[in-house]
Amino acid sequence: MATDTHAHDHQPPPDEDGPLTYYQTMEIAVRELLIEKGVFGADDVRAAIETMDARSPARGAEVVAHAWTDQEFKDALLADGGAACARLGIDIGPLRLIAVENTDDVHNVIVCTLCSCYPRNLLGLPPDWYKAKAYRARVVREPRAVLREFGTEIPDDVTVRVHDSTADMRYIVVPRRPAGTEGWDRERLAALVTRDCMIGVTVPKNP
């Protein structure tokens, strides 16, 4: 039998739990009331949370790979993002999804200046920096400087467009397909597409 010989003389990390906020208290109260009234059960809540936690940028990457390989799908995506995603079995919900395409002349980047509105059904949970006040304020005023901090240098002759998400409208960037990927299948192409590419702060790397 293995023996743990590690000396546990370090201090455990401090608990990060603090007092419940007003909205956390309200959420608990409403949830428990709805369960008590039989509107839904605790298992329904758990299953919904698991479904939300399972969302990842892989969904968005699948959408981008389809757009790269199917012009008709890309046209549909740029016309109505939600309807196009539904064709792939991806439910965007009641939100309006707007896909914006990077080109030789335009580079797009997404922000939510008020809070952290984000296409979670496609990209999963937003990164901490996306929710940070510094990003939300600076990317509107000095987008090239912010992109440079992500290692993304945009030529002066390329227009940078910043798209501000709202409570009922979300954006996804369709990045430019890297050169040298002709003949690649969608699975291989999707592996090039990162979350940050679909926010617009980086671009896919050339293979």
Image (cartoon, rainbow, N blue to C red):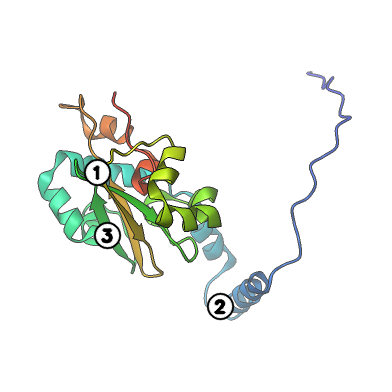
User: Quadrant where the N terminus lies?
Assistant: top right
Sequence order check: which comes first, mark 3 or mark 1? 3
Q: Secondary structure at mark 1?
A: loop
Badge 1 crowding class, 10 Å Cα cut-off, few under 14, some 14 to 19, many 20 or more, is few
Instruction: Say which residue appears at 48% left-offset and 60% top-offset.
Output: 116
Residue occupied by mark 2: 38
Badge 3 crowding class, 10 Å Cα cut-off, few under 14, some 14 to 19, many 20 or more, is many
Whole-percent x, y for residue 85 in the image: 25, 55
Q: Nearer the viewer, mark 3 or mark 1?
A: 1
Residue occupied by mark 3: 98
Q: Is residue 5 above or below residue 152?
A: above
Circle 1/circle 2 CB separation < 8 Å: no
Is residue 204 in view?
A: yes
- Of all residues, the one furthest to the front in this rendering is 156
Q: Nearer the viewer, mark 3 or mark 2?
A: 3
Label 3 and label 1: CA atoms lie apart by: 21 Å
The foreground one among 205 and 66 is: 205
Q: Secondary structure at mark 2?
A: loop
Circle 3/circle 2 CB separation < 8 Å: no
Q: Secondary structure at mark 3?
A: strand
Whole-percent x, y for residue 195 in the image: 40, 43
Whole-percent x, y for residue 110 in the image: 37, 54
Give the left or right position of residue 7, taking residue 118 as reference: right
Circle 2: residue type: Gly
Circle 1: residue type: Val
Label 1 and label 2: CA atoms lie apart by: 56 Å
Residue occupied by mark 1: 158
Give the left or right position of residue 23, taking residue 177 as reference: right
